[in-house]
Image: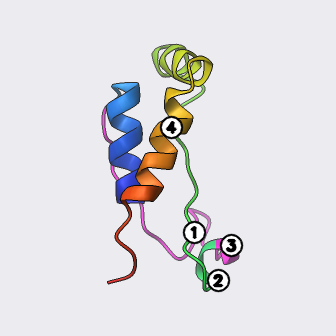
Amino acid sequence: ATALQRSMCAVLGLRDRGVKATETNGAGVELKTLTRTHAPAVIVESYFGSNATDTARASDALANGSLGKAIAEGIADWEGPR
């Protein structure tokens, strides 16, 4: 998640709001897709759709492929379990 976050923030030029590592969502419900798997898993939320600046930057990054490339690079930069 940290590698993905770093890569996406660099491409989008948005403030890094940090990685939120939790076993439950805000309502206290377990996120089974993240906690009950043996495979690495993250939920990617690259920008706030309700924020006009974020949306404009993301639209540009999606159109030119740089957001997808940033996500792929973040995955490639992952160093595996510690």
Q: Nearer the viewer, residue 69 or 50?
A: 69
Residue type of the residue flagged with mark 1: Ala
Q: Is residue 9 among what the camera can see?
A: yes
Going by the image, does 50 lie left or right of 17? right
Residue type of the residue flagged with mark 4: Lys
Going by the image, does 45 lie left or right of 19? right
Provide the secondary structure element on which disc 4 rests: helix
Tag 2: Cα neighbours inside 10 Å, few (<14), some, or many (≥20)?
A: few
Provide the secondary structure element on which disc 1 rests: loop
Give how far apart the Cα atoms at labels 2 and 4 are. Answer: 25 Å
| Camera-nearest label, 4 or 1 | 4
Which dot marks residue 41? 1
Query: Residue 9: which quarter of the image?
Result: top left
- Which residue sits at x=62%, y=65%? 27
Give how far apart the Cα atoms at labels 3 and 1 are. Answer: 7 Å
Residue type of the residue flagged with mark 3: Thr
Q: Which is more N-terminal, label 4 or label 2?
A: 2
Q: Which is more N-terminal, label 4 or label 3?
A: 3
Which residue carries the number 2 mark? 37
Tag 3–tag 4 contact (CB < 8 Å): no
- Which residue sits at x=34%, y=70%? 79
Tag 1: Cα neighbours inside 10 Å, few (<14), some, or many (≥20)?
A: few
Tag 3–tag 1 contact (CB < 8 Å): yes
Which residue carries the number 3 mark? 33
Q: Which is more N-terminal, label 1 or label 3?
A: 3
Tag 1–tag 2 contact (CB < 8 Å): yes
Q: Is residue 78 magenta?
A: no
In magenta, the rendered stretch is 15-33
- Residue 35 percent location from the top left of the image: 59, 80
Which dot marks residue 69? 4
Tag 4: Cα neighbours inside 10 Å, few (<14), some, or many (≥20)?
A: some
